[in-house]
């Protein structure tokens, strides 16, 4: 392999997703990018909970139908869903039709509204668990990334206290990765430096 070939290979090294267009796009454009919009944060909270027991690729492929089904994840609207809307969701083949997960989305929306009222925004509350800035890691391989951390355990515990479901420590760590609260792109990944630069560190 020539030097130019090595450089080209490094430029496209991914932590995960290669071979799947939807997964590649998610890795290349979204994973690890810091998010501070409450609606977007709520969307990922619900999608990460829906993913429990499934692959993230499965959820990504249904993302557009989730947005339609859940009114683009408008927090107030979701919090107000009643039995009729929940019944409609449970018949929607475009989402994961799991009653516990659908009910959790509604309950979690209500808890999110309470958090916004108390902390000013869902964003301010969530990012306080990492001191307001992304945690920067330099893993040699994606296989070195932990399933949970002290921060995700603390966040999970506090969200459960506030009445949320499907927010266990492992789910919350995946959420922290997807929202950019932590940069877990492996050190050789072409996105590692770009995502790190977004944090200002």
Image (cartoon, rainbow, N blue to C red):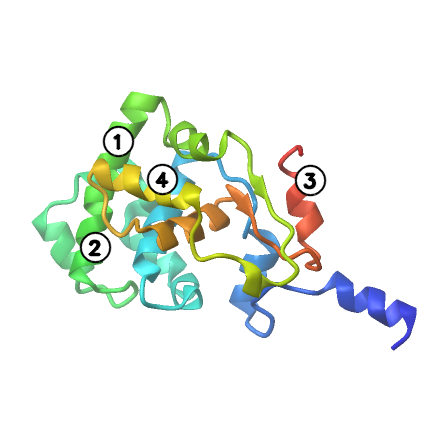
Disc 4 versus disc 2: distance between alpha carbons? Answer: 24 Å
Pair 4/2: label in front:
4
Pair 1/4: label in front:
4
Asked whether the beta carbons under mark 4 and mark 3 sit within 8 Å of each other, the answer is no
Residue 170, image x and y in percent? 38, 55
Residue 157, image x and y in percent? 29, 41
Regarding mark 3 in the picture, which secondary structure is present there?
helix
Pair 3/2: label in front:
3
> Would you call the spot at circle 4 few (<14 residues within 10 Å), some (14-19), or many (20 or more)?
few
Looking at the rendered image, the quarter that the C terminus falls into is top right
Disc 1 versus disc 4: distance between alpha carbons? Answer: 20 Å
- Mark closest to the chain's N terminus, 2 or 1: 2
Q: Quadrant of residue 187?
A: bottom right
Residue bearing the label numbered 1 = 113
- Mark closest to the chain's N terminus, 4 or 2: 2
Residue 111, image x and y in percent? 23, 36
Task: Identify the mark at residue 197; answer none if there is no mark.
Answer: 3
Pair 3/1: label in front:
3
- Mark closest to the chain's N terminus, 4 or 3: 4
Measuring 62% from the left and 56% from the top, which residue is drawn there? Answer: 139
Nearer-the-camera pick, 176 or 83: 176
Residue bearing the label numbered 4 = 154
Nearer-the-camera pick, 105 or 153: 153
Measuring 84% from the left and 69% from the top, which residue is drawn there? Answer: 6
Measuring 28% from the left and 50% from the top, which residue is drawn there? Answer: 70
Regarding mark 2 in the picture, which secondary structure is present there?
helix
Disc 3 versus disc 1: distance between alpha carbons? Answer: 32 Å
> Would you call the spot at circle 1 few (<14 residues within 10 Å), some (14-19), or many (20 or more)?
some
Disc 4 versus disc 3: distance between alpha carbons? Answer: 26 Å
- Mark closest to the chain's N terminus, 3 or 2: 2
Residue bearing the label numbered 2 = 102
Residue projecting furthest to the front: 150
């Amino acid at each position: 392999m020539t030097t130019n070939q090595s450089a080209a290979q490094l430029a496209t090294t991914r932590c995960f997703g290669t071979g799947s267009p939807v997964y590649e796009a998610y890795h290349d454009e979204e994973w690890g990018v810091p998010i501070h919009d409450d609606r977007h944060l709520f969307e990922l909270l619900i999608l990460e909970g829906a993913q429990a027991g499934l692959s993230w690729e499965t959820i990504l492929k249904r993302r557009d139908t989730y947005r339609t089904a859940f009114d683009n994840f408008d927090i107030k609207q979701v919090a107000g869903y009643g039995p009729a809307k929940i019944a409609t969701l449970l018949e929607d083949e475009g989402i994961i039709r799991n009653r516990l997960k659908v009910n959790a989305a509604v309950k979690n929306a209500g808890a999110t509204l309470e958090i916004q009222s108390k902390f000013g925004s869902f964003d301010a509350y969530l990012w306080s668990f990492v001191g307001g800035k992304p945690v920067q890691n330099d893993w040699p391989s994606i296989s070195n990334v932990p399933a949970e951390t002290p921060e995700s355990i603390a966040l999970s515990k506090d969200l459960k206290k506030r009445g949320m479901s499907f927010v266990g420590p492992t789910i919350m760590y995946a959420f922290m990765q997807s929202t950019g609260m932590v940069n877990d792109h492996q050190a050789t990944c072409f996105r590692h430096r770009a995502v790190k630069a977004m944090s200002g560190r």
